[in-house]
Amino acid sequence: MNWKPKNELLRIIKKIKLEGKCLSINCINKPIKSHAISQSLLKLISKNGEVIVFENNFFNARNPEGTIKEKKRGIAKATTFPGFCSYHDNYIFEEIDNLNFDLSGKQAFLYLFRSLSKAIIQKEQSITLLNEAKRIAESNNLNLKLNSFELGILIGMMNLTEHKLNLDSLLSNNDFKSIRFTLFHIEGMPDILFSGATFLDYDFQGNQIQNIARTDILFGLLAFSSVKLEHGWGILFVWDSKSDYACLAFFNSLKEYTKESKENAKLSEALARFIITRCDCTAINIDFWEKLNNTKKKDILSNINNIVKYPSIETKDNLLFGIENIFNFKVSKVSENY
Ligand SMILES: [Zn+2]
């Protein structure tokens, strides 16, 4: 790529990052910087008001010279996305922004809804960028091969939209009976916080859960977030019953993977691996990060690099190994509501 189109692409990338919209139905108000991870939670791990985040934007990562790098960010800006106006951000998410997770279907739903909304905004930005990239490439006689990648993003967007329609209707009917969750209670204070949603593709044995290249099924979607609990904190997985087939297969695989492990060692490892390989929105405690040796930092960075750069690519082997002895989640209890 020569300089001129690259510069134009970077200019557009900067502009696109600022755009977004309020995802509440029929709202035309301007979006604010909504937190994917609540500020009250970020405060817990911050040092001088800052946390470590990773350059978690798809567009930066597509910058030909860009790789994912850690950065210190103030918690007012860390992990934000332009997905709701000020009114709806507060109205919809106030409960989970300020209270401990109470194990209710409603609060679990809100975590799912927020993760899904962030994924939708990111996909919309990706599609806009791809269209712009194609336009620039065409006008500069460049051969830009984006087709299979682009198709992956479009299929992903179709699925996210269908899940969003379902969740919109649950929210407006105040009906959370179909919301399922598994909560891992963790002792102590978190070193890492996260908020994500993924179409499950492979499990902890490397078996395919669902084929995320198909266009004739609704992909099972699993959201996961760190949550504050009355005692300690928690790793919360949430889904709607429409995603049962994939999510139940996933948790069976996790049980199989961890069944002979002493003191939950393999469970902690599996949870950490899942989070790092599937989450593009994490925040890490600065002291914790600085104490990690370079091999461990690289292990985290390369996995985050993959999920951010190639969000619609299948990930067959990456739940089998990696991200070992980095995080030590002391799981004290598991709660399920199904
Ligand atoms: Zn709004």
Image (spheres, rainbow, N blue to C red):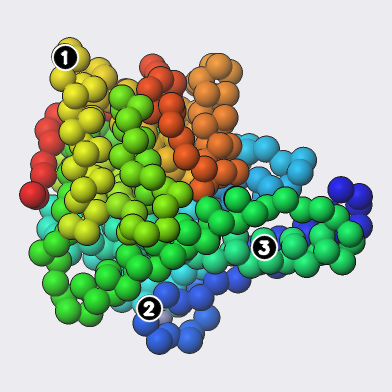
Q: Nearer the observer, disc 2 or disc 3? A: 3
| Residue of label 2 | 24
Q: Nearer the observer, disc 1 or disc 2? A: 1
Q: Are marks 2 and 3 in contact (CB under 8 Å)?
A: no
The location of residue 49, given as percent across then percent down, is: 49, 47
Residue 231 appears left or right of 11 = left
Q: Residue at x 81, y 53 (%)?
A: 143
| Residue of label 1 | 260
**Whether residue 278 is situated above or below residue 301 in the rendered picture:** below
Q: Is the residue marked by circle 1 packed among few (<14), some (14-19), or many (20+) residues within 10 Å?
A: few
Q: Specify the label residue 232 is tagged with.
A: none
Distance of label 1 from label 2 (alpha carbons):
45 Å
The location of residue 117, given as percent across then percent down, is: 40, 64
The first of marks 2 and 3 along the sequence is 2
| Residue of label 3 | 129
**Whether residue 47 is situated above or below residue 243 in the rendered picture:** above
Residue type at tag 2: Ser
Residue type at tag 3: Leu
Residue type at tag 1: Glu
